[in-house]
Amino acid sequence: MDEFHGKVAVITGAASGMGREFANLAASLGMKLVLGDVQRKLLEHFTDELQHRGAEVLAMVCDVRKGAHVQELADSAMARFGAVHLVFNNAGVGAGGLVWENSCEDWEWVLGVNVIGVANGVRTFTQVMLECAAADPGYRGWIVNTASMAGLMNAPALGIYNASKSAVVALSETLYHDLKLVDAPIGTSVLCPYFIPTQIAHSHKHRPDELRTDAIMTASQLAAQALTEKAVGSGKVSAQEVAALTFDAIREGRFWVFSHPQALGAVKERVDALVQGKQPVDPYAAMPHLKEILKAGMKGRR
């Protein structure tokens, strides 16, 4: 897909971080925007900003955990613009700590947004896009699912997040093969960012009331939170740069999108160990200071 002007882009998690930059870049390319987010006020302010710049925008509060919300986003997009060409299943949240210390609510929240949310986007919008393709012989579409390097490396004290992003990688690869199987004019990319300065370390602020708990955070959860804030906050690749890399991948028809390709060495070591039947490798071997920060944080809070 290499033509964007006048086409329609749907973006979840659109009010901040990478979603916001996908929208900014799509608007600069002359795309019509369908934006979904749970942050109502931030979404409204961003929509006003985009419209002031001349973009055509449809914005809706959308909790991607809920299939009905995603369906409403799709129905509204078709009613307003008549087609969908580019979908970013981007909404995501994070939680850390030793994997056995996470609550049922933690699992329901993170998997609900990161896995079920992407599944709802794929399930709903792929069918919409196939209908668009059936009505237009020249139709071309693309779906981008936001995973993470966490889905390829499995660092300690990030169990729920790792599991969710591994699932997104698997879902995306399967979607790629399934679309090829039916000769659909729809491409797929999976975005695997590493440490990008976004607000994901503070995503707990938007956690729904029914999945909040009164439990005090454990030492491992506090340490993981502190490490995430430090690592994400000091990231050298911006969300704006990731958006540009992603659009380049769409133009070039590439499936994999990496913000930090230099980190793939750790992925290769993991896969090599897997193939050779060896024990899992340390994902922080090349960055021992991160592991030491994590261990020190846990020790200091016991």
Image (cartoon, rainbow, N blue to C red):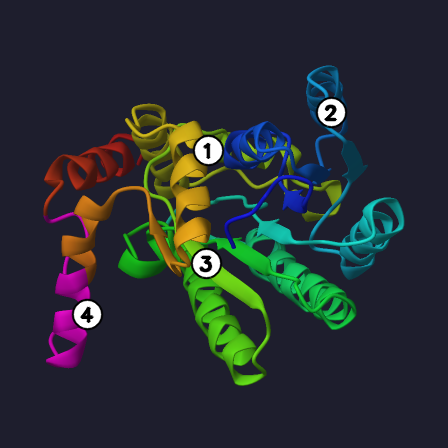
Identity of the residue drawn at 49% across and 44% down: 94
Q: CA distance from mark 4 to mark 3?
A: 21 Å
- Mark 4 is on which residue type? Val
Residue highlighted by disc 2: 47
SS type, badge 2: helix
Q: Which residues are magenta?
A: 268-285
SS type, badge 4: helix
- Closer-to-camera residue (221/110): 110
| The quadrant where residue 104 appears | bottom right
* Nearest to viewer (mark 4 / mark 3): 3
Query: Which of the marked residues, 4 or 3, is nearer the chain's N terminus?
Result: 3
Q: CA distance from mark 3 to mark 1?
A: 24 Å
SS type, badge 1: helix
The C terminus lies in quadrant: top left
| Total residue callouts | 4
Residue highlighted by disc 3: 189
Furthest residue toward bottom = 181
Residue highlighted by disc 4: 271
Q: CA distance from mark 1 to mark 2?
A: 24 Å
Looking at the image, is 131 positioned above or below residue 67? below
Q: CA distance from mark 4 to mark 1?
A: 28 Å
Instruction: Using the rendered image of the protein, determine whether residue 40 is visible from the camera's viewpoint.
Output: yes
